[in-house]
Amino acid sequence: MICQPNIKDPVQGCHQYLQQVQEGKEKYCIVIDDLQSTEEWDLIRPTFESTEKQNSDNNIAIIIITNEEDVAIHCATEKKLVWNVKGLEVDNAIKLFDQVWLLATNSRWQQDQEEAERRHRNEQIRGILLQKCGGLPKVICVVAESWERVRNIKIRDNLVSKLEANAPHSTRRLGAMFTWLDSYFRNCPDSLKPCIFYLSIFPLNHTIRRRRLVRRWIAEGYFRNNKERTAEENGDMSFSKLVNLSMIQAPGTEVNYDGMPLCQVNGFLREYIISRLTEENLVFALEDHCRMDTQHTGRHLAIDNSWDRDRNVFESIDLSLLRSLTVFGKWESFIISNKMKLLRVLDLEDVSSGVRNRDVEQMVKQLPRLKFLSLRRCKEVTRVPDSLGHLKQLQTLDTRETSVTELPKSPS
């Protein structure tokens, strides 16, 4: 009723409707979606409170949907009524996608006359899209409605950019989703925004250790010790805030949010972040077959497992302002360069092979400002050089799951 376009004030319209119905004979559920602040709730709450006083039989339930836990706690009469909803699991996401797709296209997902190859292709595309939707029902619905616009998407394509490219022909639901996204990020605290952009370093659906992420943030200078808390405690608080904002979620079926040791970046929110990175000039990636004439610049470089390790391309990049380097897949010795004088973070935890003792020696020699060095799982590394002690700013050294048995003594 209150979604009708001729009603200018849905809250007042709902209030008037509830006053007209006969008291106590019917039950009503009011859903308020996308509440963004406690101030918004304080403005509309009196309208519903007056209705509740008139209705002594408690026949009215109010459900509030918000992206922020603090807002939910403020609105709830009891904290136990606050529920952090996970993204849809794969089976339910597929079911929702297919239902909306069926309504939007007036066809069936699997028609008898459809060729097997085409059906298989469509199912592959659906799989890619659902990875990028992050389990968010509103996003799944929009993408399913926009099937004709995204049916040729590839895993490397950015879903948000593809949807935005069709903005002149967008549906009302697509326009509302982008309004929600822009508001969502605009209202994020400024102190969290560097951490949010930083998340795009990691690939889609990649599992990240919480401690690794927090220690990297500290090395970047995002958090420091203060009178109330240590840098690590401040980093943990910001991590929890990103969980509360649904930016970070537990991987797989894990549901323990409080002490979450592992996490993933929400797939769709990651797509949105990446679509904005060209504006911020912060993070860039080497993927597939990058060309030398491609614009590569930024403070944080991620080398993807798919990159063909073209040395000429790498040496054409301006690395003078680089602050962090994260490598996924095979290591090549040319990746360390004396141009990286400002590098603070070198993270090789996801390197599959190739890092040897002589590479570590070059890292220590050429990267004097390192604050974070992770060699975790680099099993071919058997020792770290004595010169490691000369890295005066080093805060974190991770040699777990390597072949290193002894660390050098710090220089006196």
Image (cartoon, rainbow, N blue to C red):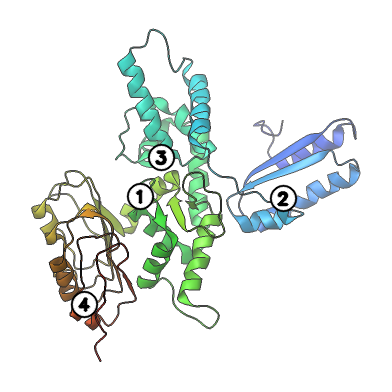
- Disc 1 residue type? Ile
Q: Residue 73: x percent and y percent? A: 68, 57
N-terminal of the pair, mark 2 or mark 1, is 2
Residue 116 in which image quadrant: top left
Q: Give the distance between the C-alpha atoms of the residues marked 2 and 4, in whole angstroms.
A: 52 Å
What kind of element bears circle 4?
A: loop
- In the image, taking residue 337 as reference, residue 20 lies left or right, namely right
**Of the two numbered discs 1 and 4 in the rendering, the one whose residue sits closer to the viewer:** 4
N-terminal of the pair, mark 1 or mark 3, is 3
Disc number for residue 274? 1
Disc number for residue 81? 2
Q: Which residue is mark 3?
A: 132
Q: Residues within 10 Å of mark 2 (few under 14, many from 20)?
A: few
What kind of element bears circle 2?
A: helix
- Disc 4 residue type? Pro
Q: Relative to the observer, which residue lies in front, 2 or 303?
A: 303
Q: Residue 61: x percent and y percent? A: 77, 41
- In the image, taking residue 359 as reference, residue 121 lies left or right, namely right
Residue for point 33% across, 55% down: 201
Q: Give the distance between the C-alpha atoms of the residues marked 1 and 4, in whole angstroms.
A: 30 Å
- The quadrant in which the C terminus is found is bottom left
Q: Give the distance between the C-alpha atoms of the residues marked 2 and 1, in whole angstroms.
A: 34 Å
Q: Which residue is mark 4?
A: 368
Q: Relative to the observer, which residue lies in front, 46 or 151?
A: 151
Residue for point 30% across, 57% down: 283
Disc number for residue 360? none
